[in-house]
Amino acid sequence: MAMTTATKKKVSVIGLGDMGAALVRSFLQQGHTVTVWNRSATKAAPLQEAGALVADSVTAAIAASEVVIFCVTNYPISRTLLDTPGAAAALKGKLFVQLSSGTPQEARELDAWATKEGITYVDGAIMAVPDQIGRPDTVFFMSGNHEAYTQSEATLKSVAGAMQYMGTDPGAASAWDMGFLSVLFGAMSGFFHGIKLFESEGLTAAALGNMIAQLAPALGEMLKQQGDIIASGNYKVNHSSLGLCAGSMDMFIQHAKEANISTEVPTFIKGIFQRGVDAGYGSEHVAAAYKTY
């Protein structure tokens, strides 16, 4: 159900990089009153033209709204801004939403600081690129104070329609985010090697991308299977042995040498698999490589 004008909360966004600016534009499109601040004031100008109010200090931006969102590079920058005279006092009685990048421990430490200062804190992780902000299928992971999240959910869904609450642990959102990104960046590394392999054989990067998109459901099922095996602790399955997979990496290394492309990715994967083989897990499912991490 859409919020009426009377129920829309005032929102302040601190940090106007590509993501912060996308958040501001989405809030404005949904009819919110948005106040912005950025260390580089030039980034605020186009948002002011779009209807945002520009504060002359971070403290003034915090004081202007009920929901205060930090979207800066990392938690240390957030902490520096929060040390600005008057900033912590201005946050009291408001909802502080941290959407900057950080570890679960950093989120817990910031929550402890906020609690000590009497500030209501919710931590979040943005699972999208700027162009995806404001869509009904855009996912943010949120965690921390459940009551505060519930009260702000409708406001936050202005920018992420498929927002998910991951639990009361303030570090949960970051943990889910980092788990996803670990898979994503690992897959990207393999994908980049795959492109080099394709190009060495006269095929295109676009062709590989199209194939991966088509096989994405199968890839997801395969990865889920690894998780299920690890969760069960039963690695004795009759296919995809760790030894077989370790041996297959030799073929990728050989091809890379023949094609005069980097052997870094297949050599790295071979090392992980071989470590498990050397530990005596060669006859078990490839998921047994996890046991040597």
Image (tube, helix red, strand yellow):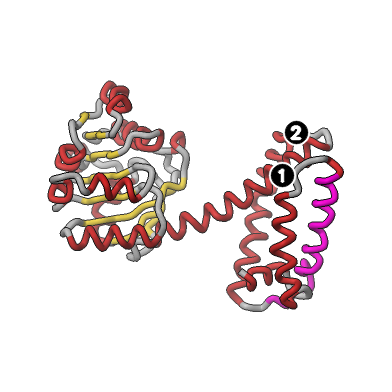
User: In this orientation, does residue 229 appear?
Assistant: no
Amino acid type at mark 1? His
Could you tell me if the residues under marks 2 and 1 are in contact, i.e. CB atoms within 8 Å?
Answer: no
Q: Is residue 28 left or right of residue 218?
A: left
**Image x and y of residue 11, in percent:** 23, 40
Label 2 – label 1 distance at C-alpha: 12 Å
**Image x and y of residue 70, in percent:** 30, 44
Q: Which residues are magenta?
A: 235-257
Which residue has dot 1 on it? 193
Quadrant that contains the C terminus: bottom right
Mark nearest the camera among 2 and 1 is 1
Describe the element under mark 2 as helix, strand or loop.
loop
**Quarter of the image where one finds residue 5:** top left
Q: Is residue 4 above or below residue 228?
A: above
Q: Residue 231: within the magenta?
A: no
For mark 2, does the 10 Å Cα neighbourhood hold few (<14), some (14 to 19), or many (20 or more) residues? some
**Quarter of the image where one finds residue 29:** top left
Which residue has dot 2 on it? 204
Quadrant that contains the N terminus: top left
Q: Is residue 112 left or right of residue 196?
A: left
Q: Residue at x 28, y 44 (%)?
A: 69
Q: Residue at x 52, y 55 (%)?
A: 180
Chain-order first, disc 2 or disc 1: 1
Q: Nearer the viewer, residue 156 or 278?
A: 278
Q: Residue at x 38, y 62 (%)?
A: 105
